[in-house]
Amino acid sequence: MTIPLFDTAAPLETLRETILERIATVVRSGRFVLGPEVGAFESELAAYLGVRHAIGVGNGTDALAIAARALGVRPGDDVVVPSFTFYATAEAMASVGARPVFCDVDPGTRNVTVETVRAALTPRTTAVVVVDLFGLPAPVREIRELGVPVIEDAAQALGASQGERRAGTLGDIATLSFYPSKNLGAFGDGGAVVTDDEQLAERVRALRFHGSRDKQSFELVGYNSRLDELQAAILRVLLPELDGWCDGRRAAAAAYAAAGLGGHVGLPAVPEGTSPAWHLYVVTHPEPDRLLTALHEHGIQARSYYRTPLHRQPAMVALAAGGGELPATERLAATNLALPISPVLGAEQAAEVVAAIAAA
Ligand SMILES: Cc1ncc(COP(=O)(O)O)c(C=O)c1O
């Protein structure tokens, strides 16, 4: 493929030597779990976000389960989650014994709204998971006004902002993923839980280490889920680059628009005051598969996401609350197509993609 869907390698080129040096330092230190690199990364991430606590965990899925447990979600509780998202969002709630109650999204932003969340609330709802889908921050603060604690799943949105606040600081607690293809990607799995709340942070720290605060007394049934020193050392090199990379992603989206993409497909709606991090640049078209074939013929990678929304996934059909129709979700599942996006996708490549779509 001449234009890949993601380009995770090119942005790392100039950082290669520094990364290798940091890896060598960790190897020499002999400390691999919960050492100085993780501590330093947690402080740097918290400072970047402007929050009091960032706690490294094993991955973004564990981050969601741990965040739910820290909030007090218990077996038998209902948790509202979007159906149009990656499976882990709902899976993590099911893994703590809660029942996912699926809600619809806005067809333009592809995010949940106050109305779609309100329609899914039940007397047993103890939390809502709001996903900043594809890197666009959702109306988390408005949803918090419904009075139910909100977990912001910002796995795809690190580097985005809404007004003065960064994605990952909008909920009562937020979760991040450092999966390699993410905007801030480690060289393996990694994640974090982020919060301003001291008590929640303390519970998260205990839960990531078997439910213990002091490694002697085990107060909770927890997890063994830590970010490791090697990943933290690598992420410390990458974090200062993140804003520049997100600028590159936004420039690529602007280049698509300037090349006339909106004349051929539906573009994501971006609310006033929101600065997306465009983890994925997803457009809509009545025949996405026809466009996909045409793009592949031109050597351009593309892909439809979440074709089977979560409320119709086999594991969730049995588990989740039945009921409501999710028309926007169904339509997005059938019509979406992610186009190449990366910090280094230039205007020429954007124009090439748009020309291939126009020809199709
Ligand atoms: C929206 C969303 N939530 C959660 C996750 C889970 O993260 P991880 O793969 O690090 O477990 C991902 C990505 O994989 C995601 O895209």
Image: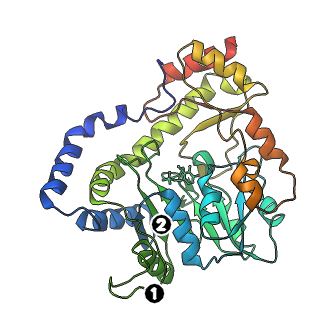
Q: Is 212 on the left-hand or right-hand side of 162? A: left
Real-space Cα separation, disc 2 to disc 1, in angstroms: 20 Å
Q: Is residue 192 left or right of residue 291?
A: left
SS class, disc 1: loop
Bin the neighbour count of mark 1 within 10 Å (Cα to Cα): few under 14, some 14-19, many 20 and up: few
Disc assigned to residue 193: 2
Amino acid under label 2? Val
Viewer-proximal residue, 330 or 163? 330
Q: In the rendered view, would you say 350 is above or below 134?
A: above
Report if residue 104 is visible in the image.
Answer: yes
Name the residue: 72% across, 52% down: 83
Pick whichever of labels 2 and 1 is earlier in the sequence. Answer: 2
Choose top left, top right, bottom left or bottom right for residue 8. Answer: top left
Residue 236 placement (x, y as % from top left): 30, 55
In the structure shown, which secondary structural element does the residue marked by tag 2 occupy?
strand
The amino acid type, in three-letter code, at marker 1 is: Glu
**Residue 219 image label:** 1
**Image location of residue 272, percent across then percent down:** 67, 50
Location of the C terminus by quadrant is top right
